[in-house]
Image (cartoon, rainbow, N blue to C red):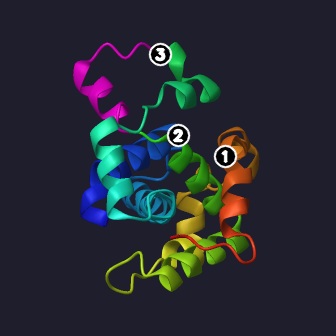
């Protein structure tokens, strides 16, 4: 499934790391990106749990970052570079919102990773240690990326749907 959703995962991860950058150099940036990628991967697998879902989003496109840019104030910066605009079309607002929820709520992240593991969405067992158990270096690197107040506007967009999906007795694949 990861290969099918890789453009969406890469673009949404890039949007999160550009919107909430790491501070402290290349290692901090890498640690922040890993955490964002893990959260986005779990969120994407929850959002598009079947090969059909993944094929449909690849065909129709996920919607882009315009709404997220507006919420975070990034829309004031002109995206005149065509290369900058192109990747933004692959950002998925729901996946970004769900990833933000997972980054700021450890309990919810645990439920989401357990749901992915229990449903067999991942072909092989996948470790999400930096998402679930960030160490001090991870937390420092992702101080903005995991800040509940900063991520609140993005997380609030689709939190209800994620809570309903991960609620008791909910199945990911019908």
Which residue lies at the image location 60% right of the left edge and 47% below the top edge?
Answer: 97
Near mark 1 (Cα within 10 A), the count class, few <14, some 14-19 or many ≥20, is: some
Residue that carries the numbered disc 2 in the rendered image: 93
The magenta region covers 77-90
Find numbered disc 2 in the image and state the secondary structure of the residue it sits on: helix
Which residue lies at the image location 41% right of the left edge and 75% below the top edge?
Answer: 121
For discs 3 and 2, the disc positioned in front in the rendered view: 2
Residue that carries the numbered disc 1 in the rendered image: 158
- State the image quarter where residue 110 is shown: bottom right
The one of 174 and 33 positioned closer to us in this rendering? 174
Residue 91 position (above or below residue 160) = above
Q: Quadrant of the N terminus?
A: bottom left
Q: Is residue 135 visible?
A: no
Near mark 3 (Cα within 10 A), the count class, few <14, some 14-19 or many ≥20, is: few
Question: Which percent across, then down, holds residue 85?
Answer: 32, 24
Q: Residues at badges 2 and 1 in contact (C-beta under 8 Å)? A: yes
Find numbered disc 1 in the image and state the secondary structure of the residue it sits on: helix
Q: Residues at badges 1 and 3 in contact (C-beta under 8 Å)? A: no
Which residue lies at the image location 45% right of the left edge and 58% below the top edge?
Answer: 44
Q: Is residue 124 visible?
A: yes
Residue 156 position (above or below residue 163) = above
For discs 1 and 3, the disc positioned in front in the rendered view: 1
Going from the N terminus, do you reach mark 3 or mark 2 first?
3
Which residue lies at the image location 42% right of the left edge and 60% below the top edge?
Answer: 37
- Left or right of 116? Residue 14 is left
- State the image quarter where residue 156 is shown: top right
Residue that carries the numbered disc 3 in the rendered image: 77
Residue 130 position (above or below residue 22) = below
């Amino acid at each position: 499934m990861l290969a099918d959703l890789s453009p969406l995962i890469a673009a949404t991860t890039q949007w999160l790391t550009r919107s909430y950058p790491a501070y402290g150099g290349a290692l901090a940036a890498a640690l922040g990106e890993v955490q964002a990628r893990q959260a986005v991967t779990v969120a994407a697998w929850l959002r598009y749990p079947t090969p059909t879902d993944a094929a449909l989003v690849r065909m129709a496109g996920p919607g882009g970052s315009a709404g997220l840019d507006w919420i975070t104030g990034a829309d004031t910066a002109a995206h005149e570079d065509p290369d900058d605009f192109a990747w933004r079309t692959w950002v998925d607002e729901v996946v970004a919102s769900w990833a933000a929820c997972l980054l700021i709520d450890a309990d919810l992240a645990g439920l989401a990773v357990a749901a992915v593991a229990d449903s067999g969405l991942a072909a092989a067992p996948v470790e999400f240690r930096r998402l679930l158990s960030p160490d001090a270096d991870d937390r420092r690197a992702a101080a903005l990326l995991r800040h509940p107040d900063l991520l609140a506007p993005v997380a609030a967009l689709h939190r209800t749907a994620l809570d309903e999906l991960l609620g008791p007795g909910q199945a990911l694949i019908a």
